[in-house]
Image (cartoon, grey):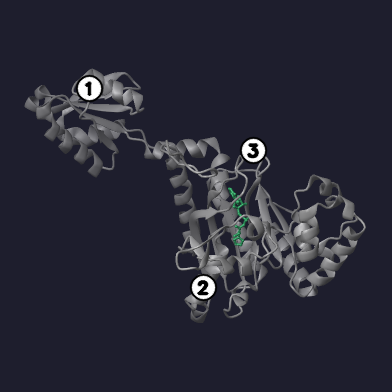
């Protein structure tokens, strides 16, 4: 038997209904805020990720699916989507149209990580990016939209962890302070930490090395917030004021640097209980130099990506139940004999035109089997069509939950069945 690859999985029905419900809600919310969808390729030139996500990050250093194609090009399955969006923005000269570009995406990403709960090699993200404005009001609106979406999905009690990583101008002084803090503590550093400290010291704040955790909690650890230049500090403080005014729950997390190099100023993450060790539900931040670093005109940006697999893992039960119910068949139409099949097709068609989800069951060939099949598939109503009904111009409907049965005139099909179909619970 050929099985799926390690770290990948099949999403099967009815679980896919919950995924569709989440994606539909995200699309609805994004469109309320003026966002349009962008779809970029699943593989890109390797260099794109090296230059944007950063050479010294774990993603580029050890998690990319990189291969040489038959034409000798080095290509990489996208580990994230922001770089692809920025590449497309530059390639199609979207900046020339001016204004604000609000884009969202839904799709698979690939990272060669050790699979565990909530961590896959192929996973899906729902993300949004705003290109153009640099003001803190845009950061605030992105977070307002995010919490709007999470709220509509039924999440409560979440808060956003927030930090500023400053700009390329004010970071060197902070990096120096970090290096001198760790200089006397070489003994606690493992090989990866030493590489990080030399190549890209901010990355050391991401270290998962247990020996380093105590040091990272040391109150003497320098905080980026003490090194912000005046503009970055002003940006950060105005964002906090706007979030407070918008009632977005946040907390300052001075060690939050995120695992990608393109960030400037605002970075954020939302974690959720119930996710286990991989507790980041989503992450994002501002990237004011990414577009220009990729050869485009100076265009600030900010965005986030939700880990959809993790979101589904902790989706509130009522929301999941509502999404599952939305796609469930409502009526089984059972022709009792071969001569009743044409009538079955017509009845099912009429129900569907009336917006009722109807499954034709031609395998049953009898009321008992028809009811058994419906019970097994949790279909609450069965319409039985036999020779006698055809002669009389009627149909029989069985309400399996209420154990009730009735015979009605065929002309009243939609009216009768419509009244019996329970309205899907509101989300
Ligand atoms: P990221 O933090 O690398 O950011 O990923 C965002 C989210 O994707 C994570 O919080 C997590 O929920 C999910 N995720 C990451 N890796 C895995 C995995 N192996 N298995 C399952 N879920 C995973 C980014 O990707 C940035 N592009 C976000 C962004 C957009 N920043 C600005 N704009």
Please name the residue that numbered disc 1 is placed on: 406
**Going by the image, does 161 lie left or right of 131?**
right
Image point 54% across, 52% down: which residue?
Answer: 149
Residues at marks 3 and 1 touching, judged by CB atoms closer than 8 Å:
no
Query: Is residue 426 at all visible to an observer of this figure?
Result: no
- For marks 3 and 1, the one nearer the N-term is 3
Mark nearest the camera among 2 and 1 is: 2
Question: Residue 296's spot in the image, x, y percent?
Answer: 57, 79
On residue 10, which mark appears?
none
Q: Residue furthest right?
A: 184
Earlier along the polypeptide chain: callout 3 or callout 2?
2
**Residue 87 image point, x, y percent:** 53, 71
Q: Quadrant of ligand 1?
A: bottom right
Residue at image coords 53%, 47%: 152
Q: CA distance from mark 3 to mark 2?
A: 37 Å
Relative to residue 183, is residue 279 depicted above or below? above
Nearer-the-camera pick, 48 or 290:
48
Write down the residue under mark 2.
Answer: 89
Q: Nearer the viewer, residue 409 or 54?
A: 54
Of all residues shown, which one is farthest toward the left? 391
Residue 1 drawn at (x, y percent): 42, 35
Q: How many marks can you see?
A: 3
């Amino acid at each position: 038997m050929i099985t799926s690859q390690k770290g990948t999985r099949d999403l099967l029905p009815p679980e896919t209904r919950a995924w569709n419900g989440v994606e539909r809600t995200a699309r609805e919310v994004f469109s309320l805020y003026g966002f349009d969808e962008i779809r970029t390729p699943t593989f890109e030139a390797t260099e794109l990720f090296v230059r944007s996500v950063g050479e010294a990050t774990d993603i580029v250093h050890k998690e990319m699916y990189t291969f040489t194609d038959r034409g000798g090009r080095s290509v990489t399955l996208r580990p994230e989507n922001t770089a692809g969006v920025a590449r497309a923005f530059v390639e199609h000269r979207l900046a020339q149209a001016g204004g604000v570009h609000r884009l969202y995406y839904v799709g698979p990403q690939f990272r060669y990580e050790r699979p565990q709960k909530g961590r896959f090699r192929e996973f899906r993200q729902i993300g949004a990016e705003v290109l153009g404005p640099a003001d803190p009001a845009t950061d605030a609106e992105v977070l307002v939209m995010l919490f709007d979406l999470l709220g509509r999905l039924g999440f409560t009690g979440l808060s956003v962890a927030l930090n500023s990583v400053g700009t390329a101008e004010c970071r060197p002084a902070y990096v120096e302070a970090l290096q001198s803090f760790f200089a006397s503590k070489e003994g606690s550093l493992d090989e990866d930490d030493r590489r990080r400290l030399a190549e890209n010291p901010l990355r050391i704040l991401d270290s998962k090395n247990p020996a380093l955790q105590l040091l990272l909690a040391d109150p003497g650890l320098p905080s980026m917030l003490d090194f912000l230049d005046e503009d970055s500090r002003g940006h950060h403080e105005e964002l906090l004021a706007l979030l407070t005014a918008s009632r977005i729950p946040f907390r300052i997390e001075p060690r939050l640097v995120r695992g990608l190099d393109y960030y400037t100023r605002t970075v954020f993450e939302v974690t959720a209980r119930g996710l286990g060790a991989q507790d980041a539900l989503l992450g994002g931040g501002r990237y004011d130099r990414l577009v220009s670093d990729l050869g485009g005109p100076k265009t600030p940006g900010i965005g986030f990506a939700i880990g959809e697999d993790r979101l589904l893992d902790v989706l509130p039960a009522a929301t999941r139940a509502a999404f599952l119910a939305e796609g469930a068949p409502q009526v089984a139409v059972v022709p009792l004999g071969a001569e009743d099949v044409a009538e079955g097709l017509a009845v099912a068609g009429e129900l569907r035109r009336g917006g009722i989800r109807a499954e034709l069951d031609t395998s049953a060939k009898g009321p008992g089997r028809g009811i058994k099949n419906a019970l097994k598939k949790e279909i609450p109503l069965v319409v039985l069509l036999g020779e006698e009904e055809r002669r009389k111009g009627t149909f029989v409907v069985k309400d399996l939950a209420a154990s009730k049965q009735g015979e009605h005139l065929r002309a009243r099909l939609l009216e009768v069945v419509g009244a019996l179909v329970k309205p899907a619970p509101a989300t």
